[in-house]
């Protein structure tokens, strides 16, 4: 099945990750608790349910309203930052408001993506090319989101290959495997479900490292994706014993990645 893949490019120093193939639903289902309030950094008045008078930012208050916003596939270019209390927005200085405006316009922070006044845990910036940039105060939150995304993509693959679909019950991906994948994604890594083989009740999902990481911002089609990548191993799921395994070919790893791991 074409275009069934996950792309990850993590910057652990900035608590930031760029992804493709991680959906708003994965974000919702992967978080232990949704935010109670969010600022719409692109000033999306149509989908807001409130406006802060001091900052003039459109906001959404209420977890249910935020959930509906995130799960609405008709809304593109979602850009938001969570915050704890409506009153805290009134404490922002002009320079801090300007920083939020810059964040919404440029898709990146001037300095720190986390505000001490707003106590935000996340920043979420989606783009027209379906590349998603997210920041996590506690980066472990992304581990759960990635787990949800991997299982969703594997179900899509499994269902596309069967005439009579039986639900595929998947165990969670072990945390050490998730952490390893994220650690080696500093130059971009693909989990290629559309090139996955099934043999003896096992799925082998190829892991591909970008050879030209500067080109990861736009994916036109599968040929662009796989034209200049290096296969470094695979993620395996056995649906007889419900076990995940990771196999890495150390000799195929780029030297800079090998040094990070060792």
Image (cartoon, rainbow, N blue to C red):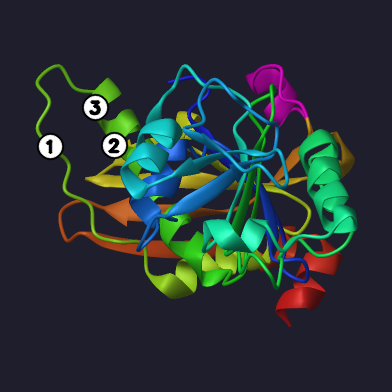
Residue 82, above or below 39: below
Nearest the eye: 113 or 97: 97
Q: What residue span does the magenta drawing correspond to? A: 218-227
The residue positioned 37% from the left and 38% from the top of the image is 65
Q: Give the crowd class for mark 2: few <14, some 14-19, many >=20 residues within 10 Å.
A: some
Quarter-of-image position of residue 183: bottom right
The residue positioned 69% from the left and 19% from the top of the image is 223
Q: Does the stretch in magenta take in 170?
A: no
| Precedes in sequence: disc 2 or disc 1 | 2
Q: Position of residue 101 (x, y in %)?
A: 81, 41
Q: Position of residue 24 (x, y in %)?
A: 46, 38
Q: Give the crowd class for mark 1: few <14, some 14-19, many >=20 residues within 10 Å.
A: few
Q: Position of residue 167 (x, y in %)?
A: 12, 37
The numbered dot on residue 167 is 1
Q: Residue furthest bottom?
A: 262
Query: Disc 3 designates what residue?
Result: 159
**Alpha carbon separation for disc pair 2 and 1:** 8 Å
Tell me whether the residue at label 3 lies in contact with that at label 2, contact meaning CB atoms closer than 8 angstroms: yes
Q: Which secondary structure, mark 1? A: loop
The numbered dot on residue 155 is 2
Q: Which secondary structure, mark 2? A: helix
């Amino acid at each position: 099945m074409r275009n069934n893949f996950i792309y990850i490019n993590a910057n652990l120093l900035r608590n930031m990750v760029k992804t493709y193939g991680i959906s708003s639903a994965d974000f919702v289902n992967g978080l232990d608790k949704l935010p109670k309030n969010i600022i719409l950094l692109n000033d999306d008045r149509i989908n807001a349910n409130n406006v802060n008078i001091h900052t003039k930012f459109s906001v959404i208050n209420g977890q249910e309203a935020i959930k509906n916003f995130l799960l609405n596939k008709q809304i593109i270019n979602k850009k938001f930052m969570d915050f704890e209390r409506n009153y805290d927005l009134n404490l922002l200085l002009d320079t801090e408001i300007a920083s939020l405006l810059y964040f919404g316009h440029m898709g990146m922070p001037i300095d720190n993506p986390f505000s001490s006044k707003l106590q935000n845990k996340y920043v979420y910036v989606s783009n027209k090319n379906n590349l998603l940039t997210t920041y996590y105060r506690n980066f472990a939150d992304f581990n759960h989101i990635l787990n949800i995304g991997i299982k969703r993509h594997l179900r899509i693959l499994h269902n596309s290959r069967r005439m009579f679909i039986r639900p595929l019950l998947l165990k969670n991906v072990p945390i050490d495997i998730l952490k390893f994948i994220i650690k080696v994604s500093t130059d971009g890594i693909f989990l290629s479900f559309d090139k996955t083989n099934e043999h003896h009740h096992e799925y082998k999902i190829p892991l591909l490292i970008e050879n030209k990481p500067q080109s990861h911002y736009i994916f036109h089609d599968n040929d662009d994706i796989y034209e200049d990548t290096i296969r470094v191993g695979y993620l395996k799921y056995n649906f007889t014993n419900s076990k995940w395994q990771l196999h890495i070919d150390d000799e195929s790893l780029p030297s800079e990645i090998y040094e990070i791991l060792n």
